[in-house]
Image: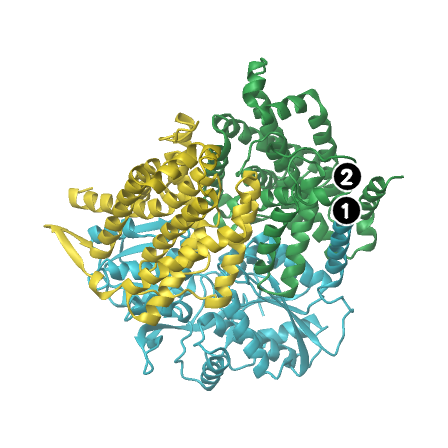
Chain colours: A green, B yellow, C cyan
Amino acid sequence: MTFRTFSYLVFIGFFMTLPLWADVFHTRLFTRILIFALLALSLDLVVGYGGMVSFGHAAFFGTGAYMTGMMSLHGITDALVVWPAAAGAAMLIALPIGALSLRTRGAYFIMITLAFAQMAYYFASGLETFGGSDGMRLLARNTIAGKEILVRHDFFYYAAAGSLAAAFLLCRRLTRSRFGLILGGIRQNEKRMQSLGYATYPYQLTCFVISAALAGLAGALMANETLYISPSYLHWTQSGHALVMVILGGLGTLAGPVLGAIVLLLLEEILSAFTQHWMIVLGPLLILVVLYARGGLHGLWPQKKVSHATTP
Amino acid sequence: MDPVLLLTQVLNGLQFGVMLFLMAAGLTLIFGVMNLINLAHGSLYMMGAYLAATLQQKTGSFIAAIFLAIPLTVLLGMLVETLALRRLYNRDHLDQVLATYGLILFFNELVRMVWGPQAYFMALPQFLSHHIQIFSGLTYPVYRLVIIGVGLGVGAGLYGLIHHTRLGMLIRAGASNREMVNALGVNIRLLYTLVFGLGAALAGLAGMLAGPLMSVEVGMGEPILILAFVVIVIGGIGSIQGAFFAAVLVGVADTFGRVLLPPGLASMGIYILMAGVLCWRPEGLFPAQRT
Amino acid sequence: MKQKSLLGICFGGLLLVLVFSVNSAASGHAADKVKVGFIATLSGPGASLGTDILDGFKLGLRHCGDKLGGIPVELVTGDDQMRPEVGVQVASRMVERERVDFVTGIVFSNVMMAVARPILDQGLFLISANAGPSLLAGDQCHPNLFTISWQNDQTHEAMGKYLQDQGIKRVYLMAPDYQAGKDGLTGFKRYFEGEVVAEVYTRVNQPDYAAELAQLRAAKPDAVFVFYPGGMGINFVKQYAQAGLKDEIPLYTTAFTLDQSVLAAMGDAALGLVNASFWSPDLDNPVNQRFVADFRETYNRLPSLFAAQGYDAALLMDSAVRSAKGQIGDEDKLREGFRKADFQSVRGDFRFNNNHFPIQNFYIRQVIRNDEGILTNKILGVAFTDHMDAYHQQCPMKW
């Protein structure tokens, strides 16, 4: 067994067994971390693999959360219906946003996705049935096939962990498929792919929409964890926070965003326990990571050989 | 809307636009020349306001405070550039985003520790606090007219600097072909530090001018930073002219949007404008020429 | 490569060890101390209110001898970062890890709505030191929730009543476009019967109001009433004065706009403005005078109304534990103690309504410069005596 396999086993073992030995607070803390890891993973699919820097993923995250709230208002509470619906709603929103945004590139793409997310934010703030800017409380967690098992925090942890694992495997499959290879080609040199006869636009749009679905699922999970939906899910700082996780962890890798989410949220939790002024420590730490850990924290993980190339 | 009110609102839009231009000019310059996305530009705006407010209380003079605070902001900007940002010019944009986001956290918390969590006071100097009558029925605050004047002056100055000086020539050359400038034996490091200092001066100046009108407080830079990004994207990244016209466009559009549209829609106004412009012209209104 | 990995693993291990060891390990519940969890926005922009409430609360604890009802107190703080979902996480830490007896703080209504149930459902007592959303005063009131501050609408109602009494006919209303803004103007209109010329909602955290002020001037109202808390208030009041409107159209507002913590940043622009509040630093009672003097000595500034709320929250807890004879495990006895509210508040006598929101006076204040040249508020008169909030009848609780 190599050192790398061993590390993976320890890592997975830790997360598999966590609710068995941790107290309720830590189970819930890590549930939240896993949900954000899912959001970061979805974002990395467009940013790291698709080369499209979306600064508006909070819109899809929020759509998933609001869809959960809306369905619960109408008495639909089964996760088997609600969660796919949340992902689907995010896809429906992402389709026009992506279709329009993909007319632009680079920094323009960053800003146009931000613009759409801001519109969604103000739209949600005006939804009086959902408590407007104050948001709305949900009555209970979703059921699974009519059974209220997610009420237990440890079961819900496994639901979140399972969703993340499924998304991880899906992304792995996707990025190694023909689709993923073409996407990588587009990221590295769009003109070349076009001259090779590939219609690049549909590939990028598909990637964008799939990513939005995962973000929507993360939103539905978040609404279940906090039992609360509010426009703050759609705020641009939420998009920024997710982007920080991705970059911190390492772009264009699957484990990177997961690591980034874990480390960033743990750092916030630990530092804020020591001082109110925790941001003055976190800020320079992020700068140090950029300056000295190229390729993000993923570079610190035991490697097989050379890591995937980040953006050129 | 009667003509006097209409004209007042046009002036208000122009004044808001000019403030945005001061922020956007530095941002687009740094982006265009060094290819750096600087999220900490808003922090320089905040630091400019805090430094000027403090110096105003120490010296008792608004003018002296401005003239002392500008070089201090420039020094601060150059210090940040030399210590951290210089190494990021050749890096991926997203690395720059993460590092400068770290700077935002740092500066916000630093200000809170040094100046306290409460907002800080910056007075409007007596000699600028009155109104003048532009024509019968239309009076306008002198200070806001001064801001318009300063903004237009800075715009003209930048235009002159970029098109008619050696430094400007290097800036233009650097924006279109970095390697070439380097190969010509120009000290590109120094050039970059100077350009960054210039950007810091503009951001700081915007903060100082905003100080007497607005609350000098922690986090004051971020809302204006987002607007400045909207402006440079609409204008075309790297283009000072584009930034100017886009800033005025955004200023006027936002002003009239707030007055005429229902509140929810008014909040979305400039984002709808930006999305519209980018769908129509994906590289902004005045795309900078690159080779 | 190997070195880097080792570094990474050490770093990861350190993080995990820390996250499972900080937040003072739950030592089970000890009867010889009472534990209070304080949740508020304590970092970044928007932290000013939270730190003020915390300072007031700490002073209150000190005046109780760092004990609540004679039992030594332990204070744990949590930062909600102004985000409801972070608030839920902090609440979970207070409830499940720290095992606190009381939770207090809570600055913003949206955080309050998110954390109230997770705390209350565990049988804990939640003492809101600021947020008082209408839902929690009405049909969602809760036997373990006590709000020491006010219901969101109340202060605005006081100003509505005052302008009505002053015989003002046409008033122009402005507030930020969010829930608290809408609640505020609703409260105002509940008591003001004259004509509302316009009801303008502006973008949250809008820096510049020149356009709105030009519209306002053109509408020529008799008076203006606004709700702009914190930084928005500073921007608005400064620009209102600079537009020359202050001498033209009188501006009325509430303590949230002209609170002690922002007056210094407004300067002369605030001088003479009239506002409504449940409290004022010059309220003439011994508790308040001691509070103001000691707060000033400790923190080197005059207290804000938020600090006063934090201070009262500490005194309320002290009285409740005392009245329950120190039996903090006994939920019913504690609730009795809280309901009695047997303490002298910074506003004099204090009592709760059936929905556990205060029944209190509201004063009309004016911003003045005191003898030392510091801007502060002075009471002009009383708008309401023993005022109850508009939602208490919707609350099914009776006691």
Mark 2, chain letter?
A
Q: What's the residue at 77%, 58% (across, down)? A: C17
Q: Is residue C327 above or below residue B252?
A: below
Q: Mark 1: few, some, or many residues within 10 Å (few <14, many ≥20)?
A: many
**Residue at far top of view:** A197
Question: Can you say which quadrant of the picture contains the N terminus of chain C?
Answer: top right
**In the rendered structure, are the residues bearing label 2 and label 1 in contact, judged by CB atoms less than 8 Å apart?**
yes
Q: Position of residue A306 (x, y in %)?
A: 74, 35
**Residue at far right of view:** A1
Mark 1, chain letter?
C
Visible in this render: residue C188?
no
Q: Which mark is residue A108?
A: none
Q: Position of residue A22 (x, y in %)?
A: 79, 55
Q: Position of residue A76 (x, y in %)?
A: 64, 37
**Residue at far front of view:** B185
Q: Mark 2: few, some, or many residues within 10 Å (few <14, many ≥20)?
A: some
Q: Amino acid at mark 1?
A: Ser
Q: What's the residue at 51%, 52% (across, down)? A: B82
A288 or A122: which is nearer to us? A288
Q: Which mark is residue A303?
A: 2
Residue indicated by mark 1: C5
Locate residue C215 relative to residue B280 in the image: left or right. left
C325 or C51: which is nearer to us? C51
Task: Name the quadrant containing residue C331.
Answer: bottom right
- Give the Cα distance between marks 2 and 1: 8 Å
Locate residue C32 relative to residue C355 in the image: left or right. right
Q: Position of residue B124 (x, y in %)?
A: 27, 63
Question: Can you say which quadrant of the picture contains the C terminus of chain C?
Answer: bottom right
Task: Name the quadrant containing residue C360.
Answer: bottom left
Q: Amino acid at mark 2?
A: Gln
Looking at the rendered structure, the secondary structure element under dot 2 is loop
Q: What's the residue at 46%, 86% (across, down)? A: C286
